[in-house]
Image: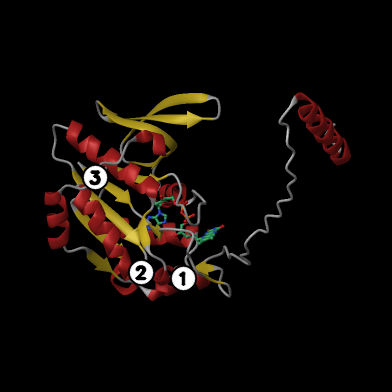
């Protein structure tokens, strides 16, 4: 059985730099980590492997700058078998549609998978569109908001989190499943895993090798543009009321009621 986990490299902290002319992240400048939800997706794959009597191969695929090899190696340290990185200036600035298209082209090239796991969303772009778009492009079923996944007979059984509860659905055959934080608790890498990762060679695939038309990928091929980026101004006005004794408390309550009336809340 073959499982593919999609791994996005995201900036570690808020200390990120944006290219305001293109509305994209300067990914090379940021200290990057595995998108946190992708760690949960990888953990689900590792658990499925541990629960399976069959041999389960786990590959990881990422699209990003060359530095993204580090997140693939981190995934290998955690137990993944092989890492693939799509890296080329021609891919830069892809929106979710182009990203999904490029990932789909890569999946068609590198292997056939019984299950494709991704995070429900990435912490930088945060659209949650890549998994469903990829499934549509690969003509596969997609199960979103997965809070648990297991193999039952020949089907993938997925518990989905809804607004008012859970539902459990099953699908046979290959599928794309978008994993929530609730689905697993990521493990820590072992020393042996770290050694294996250090020695591992991730396969880097450029646009030419992928055979994707440059007109179909990257910023210029992306129908979605981030037209402006700004930091919201948080204007906080505050007034401290002290209520150290019953009289003070009464005054404070009167003042709060007056403020609420002034603002039209009461
Ligand atoms: C601030 C900001 C705003 C953006 N807004 C938009 C927008 O509104 N519309 C738009 O189309 N694009 C937008 N983008 C671009 C978007 O980040 C990229 O297209 C990105 O590759 C995928 O989108 P996402 O980050 O929303 O990922 P999501 O769709 O939230 O990611 C879900 C999962 O898909 C997988 N995945 C996503 N990207 C990759 C990757 N490169 N490699 C491997 N796996 C991956 C991961 O498993 C991830 O957990 C924005 C980018 C930034 C930085």
Q: CA distance from mark 3 to mark 1?
A: 29 Å
Q: Earlier in the sequence, mark 2 or mark 1?
A: 1
Q: Residues within 10 Å of mark 2 (few under 14, many from 20)?
A: some
The part of the image, by quadrant, that contains residue 234 is bottom right
- Indicate left or right for 20 with 171 as reference: right
Q: Tell me the number on the disc at residue 41.
A: none
Q: Residues within 10 Å of mark 3 (few under 14, many from 20)?
A: few
> Of residues 154 and 160, which is closer to you in this image?
160
Q: Tell me the number on the disc at residue 188.
A: 3
Residue at 48%, 69% in the rendered image: 93
Element class at badge 1:
loop
Q: Earlier in the sequence, mark 3 or mark 1?
A: 1
Q: Which residue is mark 1?
A: 26
Q: Nearer the viewer, mark 3 or mark 1?
A: 3
Labels 3 and 1 touching (C-beta < 8 A): no
- Indicate left or right for 215 with 60 as reference: right
Q: Nearer the viewer, mark 3 or mark 2?
A: 3
Labels 2 and 1 touching (C-beta < 8 A): no
Q: Which residue is mark 2?
A: 65
**Residue 253 versus residue 28 in the image, above or below:** above
> Of residues 177 and 184, which is closer to you in this image?
184
Q: Earlier in the sequence, mark 3 or mark 2?
A: 2
């Amino acid at each position: 059985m073959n499982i593919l986990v999609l791994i996005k490299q995201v900036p570690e902290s808020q200390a990120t730099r944006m290219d305001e002319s293109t509305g994209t992240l300067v990914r090379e400048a940021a200290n990057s980590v595995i998108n946190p939800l992708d760690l949960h997706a990888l953990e689900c794959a590792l658990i499925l492997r541990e629960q399976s009597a069959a041999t389960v191969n786990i590959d990881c695929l990422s699209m990003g700058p060359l530095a993204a090899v580090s997140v693939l190696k981190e995934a290998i340290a955690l137990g993944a078998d092989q890492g693939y990185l799509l890296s080329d200036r021609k891919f830069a600035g892809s929106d979710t549609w182009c990203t999904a298209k490029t990932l789909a082209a890569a999946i068609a090239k590198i292997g056939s998978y019984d299950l494709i796991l991704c995070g429900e969303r990435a912490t930088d772009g945060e659209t949650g569109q890549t998994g469903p778009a990829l499934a549509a492009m690969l003509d596969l079923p997609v199960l979103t908001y997965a809070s648990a996944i297991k193999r039952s007979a020949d089907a993938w059984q997925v518990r989905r989190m809804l607004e008012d509860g859970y539902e459990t659905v099953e699908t046979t055959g290959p599928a794309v499943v978008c994993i929530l934080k609730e689905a697993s608790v990521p493990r820590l890498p072992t020393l042996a895993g770290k050694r294996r990762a250090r020695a591992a060679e991730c396969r880097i695939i450029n646009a030419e090798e992928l055979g994707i038309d440059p007109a179909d990928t990257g910023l210029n091929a992306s129908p979605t543009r981030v037209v402006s980026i700004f930091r919201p101004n948080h204007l906080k006005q505050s007034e401290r009321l002290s209520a150290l004794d019953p009289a003070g408390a009464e005054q404070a309550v009167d003042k709060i009621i007056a403020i609420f009336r002034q603002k039209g809340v009461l």
